[in-house]
Image (tube, grey):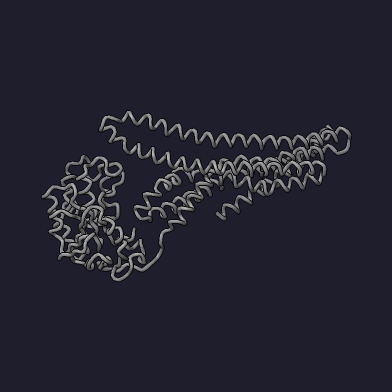
Amino acid sequence: MRRHLLATVGCGVTISVSTIAAAVVLAHIVAGIITDPGSATRHGAAIVTLCALWLLRAAAHWLQGRLSQRGATAVIGELSSQVLRSVTSLPPRRLATDRDAAAAVVTRGLDGLRPYFTGYLPAVVQAAVLTPVAVVVMACYDLQAAAIVVIALPLIPIFMVLIGLVTAERSAAALAAMTTLQARLLDLVAGIPTLRALGRAAGSVQRITELAAAHRRSAMATLRIAFLSSLVLELLATLGVALVAVSVGVRLVHGEMTLAAGLTVLLLAPEVFWPLRRVGAAFHAAQDGKTAAEQAFRLCETHAPVQGGVRVPGSAPTIQLDGLGPAIEPGRVTVLTGPNGAGKSTALQAILGLTTLPSGPVRVDGVDVADLDPTTWWHSIAWLPHRPVLIPGTVRENLELLGPLADLDRACRDAGFDDVLADLPDGLDTQIGRTGVGLSLGQRQRLGLARTLGSSARLLLLDEPTAHLDAALEQRVLQAVVARAHAGATVVVVGHRDPILAVGDRVITIGAVHVSS
């Protein structure tokens, strides 16, 4: 950001100096030719100088635009990464609350920062450099014209502030509307397969049309303010230039000033107002991005991920859930059971460090899980949630989503996924969609199991691992789970079915004080 600002200021100073110098040189060339037509051949050096100044100004504009694009891309990418890191470190329930806002900011909102860097910041620099220097140069040639400009100039910032207050509120409202509309539209699109299966896909057309119309009205309301404000600024700037032109013209007629001075003032007058007009026009284009950036900073500050912490021990850990029975030890299968809603899945999330338990902290080898380094802690865990996380891509990419598997074939056999691979058209290279579209629920469960059982992690957290599996396959999977525990891993299984309870070396009932071994 500092490098971008320095480059922008440097290019702005170059543009300002070349613009003013070119106006002075051009005015003297034209005045000399008009007053003495035969002297055109004597202005060769001045014409070359003028062309060099124009080329310098064009090169500075090009370089400023190029650097601004690069700076905007870097800042947008970094800020998007920070938002994603912050939001994805949230507990699942908090993540569900801020997911829509983060999605709107990252996917579309921060793109509005590009006009801020490529248009607004350069315009502000130009206004800070070119406008005052041009007024000073005008005063050197004609104090009266400079006085007119000084009187008319403050009107533009005053109206910019007034219009900016309205625009800021409108941009915040537009971002909120975009977030809501995008969330509803995504939910609707995600439900289209279900609607098609029920034969009611046509009913979503009307809803999509209504959402599109609402978004269009919000965008048009913002554009309406931008167009009206631009009109006001253009009128004020035109009025200021016209007053200078009338004053100069009258005095030229009466011979009260030289032609060179008059032309210099006339050429500089538009340059005085131009940066402010550009600031006003770029302000509206950049306001949406600034609003999105403020939302992004809010998400980053509120949900800053924890960095550092105690290193995770190298061996399989012993876990203590305060208030929920004895410690969970390595080499044994611990089953968490209880009625629905008792907090079994929440206990797994607490072990991961994603949430806290009302009964007390979770301790890993005597260390509070909140004090552990989250990155190394998560790398030591293989977690199978109730719904396995699957991404668009090949089956192989989903199996190795969390890293390569030590023995892919064995992991697939233990999970019963080898039978699925045999039926897939391209085997491991078969493409699947979001959340595993293309596979049945049972096949998705087997894929998630293969990924977890094939991991070399020292801690296995399994949430209803045998859901959607038949009895024979359930026994095969449970035998593999027991084998991992006997090999020295710490294994925690959530379940309530008898086969799962039967393989537990220790069964802890959540929601009741009951432990069996």
Q: How many marks?
A: 0
The residue nearer to you, when weighing 422 against 185, is 185
Tell me if 376 is positioned left or right of 242 in this view: left
Residue 369 vertical position relative to residue 212 in the rendered view, above or below: below
The residue nearer to you, when weighing 76 against 60, is 76
Farthest left residue? 472
Tell me if 127 is positioned left or right of 412 in this view: right
Residue 237 vertical position relative to residue 504 in the rendered view, above or below: above
Residue 31 x %, y %: 81, 36
Tell me if 451 is positioned left or right of 113 in this view: left
| Quadrant of the frame with the C terminus | bottom left
Asked which quadrant contains residue 430, the reply is top left
Residue sitting at 25 percent across and 56 percent down? 342
Residue 415 x %, y %: 18, 52
Residue 260 x %, y %: 82, 39
Residue 267 vertical position relative to residue 497 in the rendered view, above or below: above
Farthest front residue? 512
Query: Does residue 45 show up?
Result: no
Residue 416 vertical position relative to residue 145 in the rendered view, above or below: below
Query: Does residue 101 show up?
Result: yes
| Quadrant of the frame with the N terminus | bottom right
Tell me if 345 is positioned left or right of 72 in this view: left
Residue 403 x %, y %: 29, 55
